[in-house]
Amino acid sequence: MHNILVLNGPNLNLLGTRQPEVYGHTTLKIIEDLCVSHGETRGLAVSHLQSNHEGALIDAIHAARGTQDGIVLNAGAYTHTSVALMDAISSAQVPVVEVHLSNIHAREEFRHKSYIAPVAIGQIIGFGAQGYVLALDALAAHLTERSAG
Ligand code: CA2
């Protein structure tokens, strides 16, 4: 059984309540429940956390070292600004899959830059809530491959 943290950043607590044309109708609670139940089918113990605070996200990444086998991270707008999150991921030595609900490359130019991408094992972008499920599958495959090799 692998432990996986699904970590969501600023404003993602508003999912399903505003801007459904961009982010869909699915609430964060539905996504978190989906991750837990999908994780069970893949032998993953999924926990989840959302914070609007950069420092709390950094603390969660630090705490993941030695306790989590992987992180699914949607850092929200901090994706495009946070060297501090990038540094936290670099030092944590926990594989991270970066997720975005929307296709950030089809949006404003400032969303094209990701400080997470260089320190993530991969990105899943533009598939809405399904992206979290895809990210869990990607992490499960990565962890299986790593333990086999
Ligand atoms: O597409 C994504 O998942 C994003 O990470 C979402 C962030 C955005 O800043 C990134 O560029 C891409 C924004 C999350 C805000 O979510 C809201 C949901 C409902 C209403 C308002 C904001």
Image (cartoon, rainbow, N blue to C red):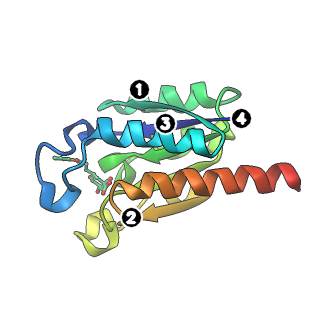
Quadrant, the C terminus? bottom right
Q: Residues within 10 Å of mark 4 (few under 14, many from 20)?
A: few
Q: Which mark is residue 56?
A: 1
Q: Determine whether, in the image, residue 16 is placed left or right of residue 49.
A: left
Q: Earlier in the sequence, mark 4 or mark 3?
A: 4
Q: Nearer the viewer, residue 40 or 83?
A: 40
Q: Earlier in the sequence, mark 4 or mark 1?
A: 4
Disc number lying in front (1 or 2): 1
Mark 1–mark 3 distance (CA, rounded to whole Å) = 22 Å
In the current view of this chain or complex, which residue is farthest to the right?
A: 149
Cβ–Cβ under 8 Å for marks 4 and 2: no
Task: Return the residue at label 2.
Answer: 113
Q: Residue at x 33, y 72 (%)?
A: 105
Residue 8 makes an appearance in the image: no
Disc number lying in front (4 or 1): 4
Q: Earlier in the sequence, mark 1 or mark 2?
A: 1
Task: Return the residue at label 3.
Answer: 36
Mark 1–mark 2 distance (CA, rounded to whole Å) = 22 Å
Q: Amino acid at mark 1?
A: Ala
Task: Return the residue at label 4.
Answer: 1
SS of the residue under disc 3: helix
Q: Earlier in the sequence, mark 1 or mark 3?
A: 3
Q: Determine whether, in the image, residue 89 is placed left or right of residue 140.
A: left
Mark 4–mark 1 distance (CA, rounded to whole Å) = 26 Å
Q: Nearer the viewer, residue 30 or 11?
A: 30
Cβ–Cβ under 8 Å for marks 4 and 1: no
